[in-house]
Amino acid sequence: MISAKLRFCAGALAAAALSATSLPRPAAAADEATTLAIPAINLGFITRYVAEEEGFWKKQGLDVKITHIQGIGSMNAVISGSVDFSMSSGPSITRANARGQKLVALATGIGESDEYIVIRKEIAEAAHFNPNAPLEERGKILKGKTIATGGAGAIPDIVLKVVQKLSGVARDDVRTTPMQPPEFMAAFSRKSIDGFVSGPPFTQEALLDGSGVLVSNAAKAEPKQYSPVSSALLLARASFCPEHRSICTKMVHGVVEATKFIHDHPKETLAILKKNFSKYDDKVLAASYEALKAMTPVPPITTPKSLENADDMNIQAGFMTEADKLKDYAAIIDNEFVK
């Protein structure tokens, strides 16, 4: 027969166990939240699509809200504090810093401009255009043409003006019209514009369907005088990362993982491209992937030379003067989170 003392102990233990199971459990740590602005919808921002789809940010406990703000407006949103990060370009960040808007480069997603200049095929044929001529000669075909760019002062516009200058084509001898890809591809098809400046998949679509001819080839690092140059450049206000170290660590780590994935997992990367750009032919996406992979640095470190070339492009395009050129490019680069 169980003694009263033993019955009491057993009852006490049972009550304690029940009490322990009914205690509230610690809540899982909430994800940190941040915001990212993207200036255009194209595959030049492939690292963003891969990091998002593969959950490289989410797995680290970072909730990234992505917004699309056309052209340099995305970087301006960072400057104003409306968003934490943007993926902009080398010419944009150097121009901002020259004007006292303190930004820092955190990771270079693409190591070239990723901007091709495309002209309609019938225009090229009528001009007896030689695609094998030096760029300075090829660029002469731009004179008197109407070319679509992503926005005034954005990197497509800068590349166009640089090629014009190298080719001796005056700034006012080319009519530019700011359009987003769905608009300029439709206008190109209707022949209401003569060409456009953009990256994958739009350039590859025009080349593969035979409607376009390359004037300037980003896949060959043209214009070569300004290679390498940072594009799809993750940047933030200079004060942000010292105050939010954890967010910056997670944000950049997601980009680092994405660049590795792009090189190591072609099939899976192509599936991500197809998911986000489903209306494009598989051959167009495959050609886009190959071009982008070749331009994607691993790790995505930003070099002083890639920003100095960006500054020189600004000067050549007429958006800055030689006197505006920065003295120390390393001062606006923080590769700590990439390593």
Image: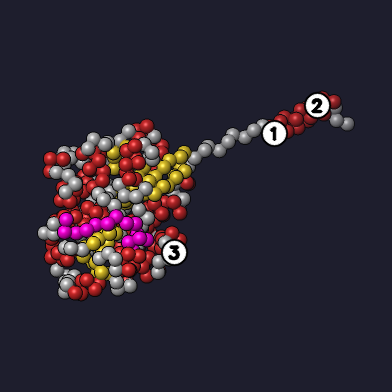
Q: What amino acid does circle 2 point to?
A: Phe
Q: Residue furthest front?
A: 192
Tell me where residue 280 appears, x and y as whole percent: 40, 66
Label 3: which residue?
Answer: 278
Identity of the residue drawn at 44% across and 51% down: 52
Q: In the drawing, what numbered circle is on residue 22?
A: 1
| Residue 158 is at least partly visible in this image | yes
Judging depth in this view, the residue of 295 and 150 nearest the camera is: 150
Query: In this rendering, would 112 be left or right of 22?
Result: left
Q: CA distance from mark 3 to mark 1?
A: 50 Å
Q: Secondary structure at mark 2?
A: helix
Tell me where residue 227 appears, x and y as whole percent: 20, 54
Q: Secondary structure at mark 3?
A: loop
Judging depth in this view, the residue of 138 and 64 nearest the camera is: 138
Tell me where residue 147 appears, x and y as whole percent: 25, 61
The verdict on residue 182 being magenta is yes
Q: What amino acid does circle 3 point to?
A: Ser
Quadrant location of the C terminus in the rendered image: top left
Q: Residues within 10 Å of mark 3 (few under 14, many from 20)?
A: few
Which range of residues does the magenta coloring cover? 172-185
Identity of the residue drawn at 19% across and 46% down: 319
